[in-house]
Image (cartoon, helix red, strand yellow):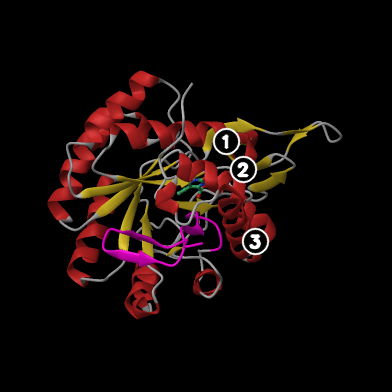
Amino acid sequence: VDLSVSWLGLAMANPLYNASGVMCRSVAELEQVRTSAAGAVITKSCTPQPRVGNPEPRYCATPLGSINSMGLPNAGYPYYRDYARSYPYAAGKPLFLSLSGMTLDENLDMLRDLAAAELLCLPEVNLSCPNLPGKPQLGYDFQACSEALTQITRVYQGPFGVKLPPYFDQVHFAQMAAVLNAFPGLRFVTCINSIGNGLVIDVERESVVIKPKDGLGGLGGSYVLPTALANVREFYRLLPDKHVVGCGGINSGREAFMHILAGATVVQIGSCLYEEGEGAFARILDELSALMVQKGYQRLDDFRGKLKTL
Ligand SMILES: C=Cc1c(C(=O)O)[nH]c(=O)[nH]c1=O
């Protein structure tokens, strides 16, 4: 079967890569993804200056997924920009740079520099970090998003994308789509970021499992699959001129198939990659291929976006 994807002027051998935040904070980790079976690479969301992030423990895996309140630990924008400078684009795996400034000005500063550097990587602007104490997720403030995107498209004229939080209300899907459709340069949306501020409890210890925010953190993994699929399918319908990157709850070829069936052009893995390591890429791709053979599909376009309704 043919797993290749051609989008945004990029050619990918397959639709699978890491979710920002997992296996992508250091060059060593980024190189692990780049030299794995993954079809692309994305960096950890960054701020202009390095950040240590929240106190540990700040990540915990459970049988149904994960909870994290990392607090945006990262090596700082220059570190990732320099990696993007030396990145071997000709090897055929696109590089995405995730930006998550603490303020709009920080995002504008990083995007100005990125525009001037004229690199082949594509920005994914994070509108949805749920773990910065005292900071609301921009993605839930539609007016603020519209203003931010107006300024972002002034400083960055190239194609870019945004990482969205999960929405849970059809009016919100429509309102956010109306904001996003006003920006033709915004070429993709990544749905979803973790479901913010969940609480995992350890019964034996009668305790929370992560230290920040008295245990509140973003949920990933199987917990979020139905919400991720709903966000992919709704934005696939509401953003006809843009691509949707599926993220959330992909543990096997079956969930990757679901995301693509719902409309995703490409898909990212987070919790599963954190727990399993880079072998997850080849395993999931093999499972996806086997499922396609079983169903008689030759390529991803044979079923992408063709989810049936009743
Ligand atoms: C960029 C910060 C994020 C973080 C974090 O660094 O805490 N965790 C997430 O699940 N999503 C984020 O967007």
Label 3: state its secondary structure.
helix
Q: Is mark 3 within 8 Å of ligand 1?
A: no
Q: Is residue 62 left or right of residue 20?
A: right
Q: Amino acid at mark 3?
A: Arg
Q: Which residue sits at x=47%, y=51%?
A: 267
- In space, the residues marked 2 and 1 are separated at their CA atoms by 6 Å
Residue 67 rendering spot, x and y as whole percentages: 63, 41
Tell me whether circle 2 and circle 1 mark residues in contact (CB < 8 Å): yes
Q: Amino acid at mark 1?
A: Val
Judging by the rendered image, the residue that carries numbered circle 1 is 224
* In-front residue for pair 185/9: 9
Q: Is residue 74 left or right of residue 114?
A: right
Judging by the rendered image, the residue that carries numbered circle 2 is 221
- Can residue 132 be seen here? The reply is no
Identify the residue at the far front of this view: 296
On screen, residue 130 above or below 117: above
Q: Amino acid at mark 2?
A: Gly
Q: Which residue sits at x=65%, y=51%?
A: 56
Residue 98: which quarter of the image?
Answer: bottom left
Q: Is mark 1 within 8 Å of ligand 1?
A: no
On screen, residue 304 above or below 204: below
Residue 201: which quarter of the image?
Answer: top right
Question: Is residue 3 rendered magenta in the image?
Answer: yes
- Can residue 249 be seen here? The reply is yes
- In space, the residues marked 3 and 2 are separated at their CA atoms by 17 Å
Secondary structure mostly taken by the magenta-highlighted segment of the chain: loop
Q: Which label number is shown at residue 194?
A: none
